[in-house]
Amino acid sequence: MRMKLLLADDHLMVRKGLRLFLQSQPDIEIVGEASTGLEAVTLAEQLQPDVVLMDLIMPEMDGIEATKQLKQKYPGMKIIILTSFSDQDHVLPAIRAGAEGYQLKDIDPDELIYTIRAAFSGKRHLHPQATDQLMSHMTETKKDEKEPRFETLTKRERDVLREITLGKSNKEIASTLYITEKTVKTHVSSILSKLDVHDRTQAALLATKEHWFGEEA
């Protein structure tokens, strides 16, 4: 079964080069070419290609917005980003928009064919640099998820949590911090809620694991 493919790039020479190469493939039929993001959306609606090879930087509408609009209307349409940009500011929005593939324009031709066929069969295939950006983003996100939980605690709640990690009881904490035991209980309840843990032991373990008070030990 031949797949129908639409080319979207604002550079004529790029489109000509892609057409020359891709039309030599027995399982690919080039059904149209677009020079702007808006034209890509319009032609895709008219021609209903199986795969769209989409540039990111184009007049009238960029490739990310075009991808987003097409995936919303035609979830089954496969879109591969072919660009010169491999930074997070381009990779992440493109993947979020629904692109099945992300490749750079210096890609080996055989690798491009593999990416197109993979997308057509429902598989994602990304350039290694794009994959690295995704992994870095995930790592940063996980790191960020740890920090804010501690940052949401007030200074007094941190003081109480520090004492909890030392194994002190509410009565001992009250004595150390010169506050009432009832106030300690209130702070403990707030700490458990903010840290999303069930008891003071879990709170202590979390604080120890994340080394929140390591510099004070």
Image: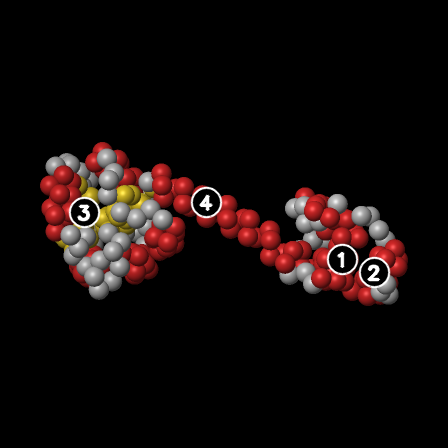
Q: Which residue corresponds to the image point at 82% horizontal and 66% vertical from the top-left? A: 183
Question: Does 66 sit above or below residue 211?
Answer: below
Report the Cα–Cα distance between label 2 and label 3: 72 Å
Location of the N terminus by quadrant is top left
The percent coordinates of residue 131 (x first, y second) are: 39, 42
Of the image marks 2 and 1, the number of the one nearer the N terminus: 1
User: Tags 2 and 1 in contact by the CB under 8 Å rule?
Assistant: yes
Colour basis: secondary structure
The residue mark sitting in front, 4 or 2, is 2
| Kind of residue at disc 3 | Lys
Residue behind mark 1: 159
Q: Which residue corresponds to the image point at 81% horizontal and 62% vertical from the top-left? A: 185
Locate residue 122: give its quadrant.
Answer: top left
Of the image marks 2 and 3, the number of the one nearer the N terminus: 3
User: Tags 2 and 3 in contact by the CB under 8 Å rule?
Assistant: no
- Determine crowd level at label 4: few under 14, some 14-19, many 20+ residues with C-alpha closer than 10 A: few
Of the image marks 1 and 3, the number of the one nearer the N terminus: 3
Which numbered dot is residue 177? 2
The residue mark sitting in front, 2 or 3, is 2
